[in-house]
Amino acid sequence: MTAVRFEHVSKWYPRYHQLVRGFKASLLHLPETLRSFKREQFLALHDVSFQIQKGETVGLVGANGSGKSTTLALIAGVLVPQTGRVEVKGRVCPLLELGAGFHPDLTGRENIVLNGILQGLTRREVLGRMDEIIAFSELEYFLDQPIRTYSSGMIARLGFSIAAHLDPEILLIDEILSVGDLHFQEKCRDKLREIKTRQVTIVLVTHASAEVRRLCDRAIWLQEGRVVGTGDPDSVLARYEQSPCVVR
Amino acid sequence: MKDLLLVLTQKEIKVRYKNSWLGYAWSVANPLAFALIYFVAFGIFMRVEVPNYPLFLIAGLFPWHWLANSIGAAPNIFLANATLIKKVRFPRNVLVASTVLNDGLHFLLSIPVILGFLIAFRFAPSWSWLIGIPLLALAQFMMAYGLALAIASVNLFFRDLDRLTAIAITFLFFLTPIAYSSSMIPTPYQAMIYLNPIAPLMVSWQQLFLSGSLSWPLLLLSYGYALACLGLGSLVYLKLSSRFAEVV
């Protein structure tokens, strides 16, 4: 069964900095503003097609600006492609970057509830998982302290613990396994392996090739918004690592 | 959705009270301070002739502050949650609803203070409050939510909207009979005041608190404007929300 299907997906962004300068400037230079809409676009993904099977763990690799995060955002449904189709089957749970979705003045416990509900669970479902999340994070003693007192490693622990225990069907991970101490990193890997055995689809974006080799069944290599390689992680990574660095 | 609104509103309230135990005092102090300064400037120095002027000010300023706070906060609502909007798919309008709800709750909690002033001036509350307060509060919620939703959405595309909003709030305040009564307006302009969408609502609050009366034409007009604001806000949001993650 296919969990994620991209069919000829293209995504471009207008150069919004033209626009973000505000009303006043936009109105004062109206013709220029209108022209800039048409002319200045940034092509983030160009005619991308791929499929990810249910239960598969896929690593997205590529240089900065190659379209990896755009791909994740399209899977998460926060972006809409201009052309092509994105089909996603199952509940998507993005593992949020450090502290996103947390409020610094709320306690760890309150943030778990907030975060879980933002990810689409009901309050009751989150409360039912609370003990597991707390146990995994090993943060029992800090849980009633406001998050602003946490170290960045502690916040990362909490974030991973929440995402890992919300029973996602598709888990999106964007370059955040490298936080936390070695012991916790190892624990995260074990947890991911366990999640994998439960037929959860995992899409991983990372620059750590070792991570992709260790965890992924397949790698997809993006370059300048196109898929230039897909297949067994070792062979894709070997080609990727030899390619000249292209940064847009 | 219901849980999300609940938890986000709870969060706002918790955050307000966690930072200081004086949270309640602060939410009351602001409109009271304005009442005091307008009383001194307009009542004593400029000798505005409104019977029971301090009471009149309080009856108008408390509901006004709910509206002004929500609209004033609107430009930053989505910006403050940028990381979340970029990663997680959830109904973003709930962020706006919880802000407006939170301000509304503070207004409702400050009604005992209004009551205290009424009693100090030997006025009695009226049973009509029991219907009047919910009716007016609902209209005001719809109005504030609609306007805030439109402003919050558009501000992502035109970042200087917050400056315009601040100016607009000042305009709105002085064009609404809050520091003066509608009967003081020269006859040729009397009707024009009701072109201001918030005027019927504010006048209704004053009448309800001071005389316990509800004017049905004013109420009807308030609801008309409230629905129009709600419609406008929803329309703008529907039109723009699919691109929030690109521009936030």
Image (cartoon, rainbow, N blue to C red):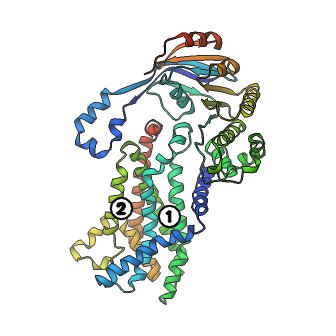
Q: Quadrant of the N terminus of chain A?
A: top right
User: Residue at coordinates 55% horizontally, 65% vertically from top-left?
Assistant: B105
Q: Position of residue B231 (x, y in %)?
A: 42, 52
Q: Which residue is the site of mark 2?
A: B169
Does the image show residue A147? yes
Q: Foreground residue, A121 or A30?
A: A30
Q: Where's residue A77, x and y in %?
A: 54, 33
Residue B224, label in figure: none
In the image, what residue occupies the spot 75% across and 45% down?
Answer: A134
- In depth, the one of A79 and B210 nearer the eye is A79
Residue A219: image quadrant is: top right
Disc 1: host chain: B
Q: Alpha carbon of mark 1 to alpha carbon of mark 2: how far?
A: 21 Å
Residue ID at (68%, 35%) = A180
Identified by mark 1, the residue type is Leu
State whether residue B48 appears in this view.
no
**Residue B181 placement: quadrant:** bottom left
Left or right of A155? Residue B38 is left
Badge 1 vs badge 2, beta-carbon distance below 8 Å? no
A164 versus A9 height, above or below = below
User: Of all residues shown, which one is farthest toward the left?
Assistant: B188
Residue holding disc 1:
B138
Q: Answer above or below: position of A211 versus B94.
A: above
What quarter of the picture does the C terminus of chain A occupy? Answer: top left
Q: Earlier in the sequence, mark 1 or mark 2?
A: 1
Q: Are marks 1 and 2 on the same chain?
A: yes
Disc 1 packing (10 Å; few <14; some 14–19; many ≥20): some
Disc 2: CA contacts within 10 A as few (<14), some (14-19) or many (>=20):
some
User: Which of these two is toward me, A182 or B78?
Assistant: A182
Q: Position of residue A121 (x, y in %)?
A: 67, 43
Q: Secondary structure at mark 1?
A: helix
**Compared to A124, does B136 lie above or below?**
below
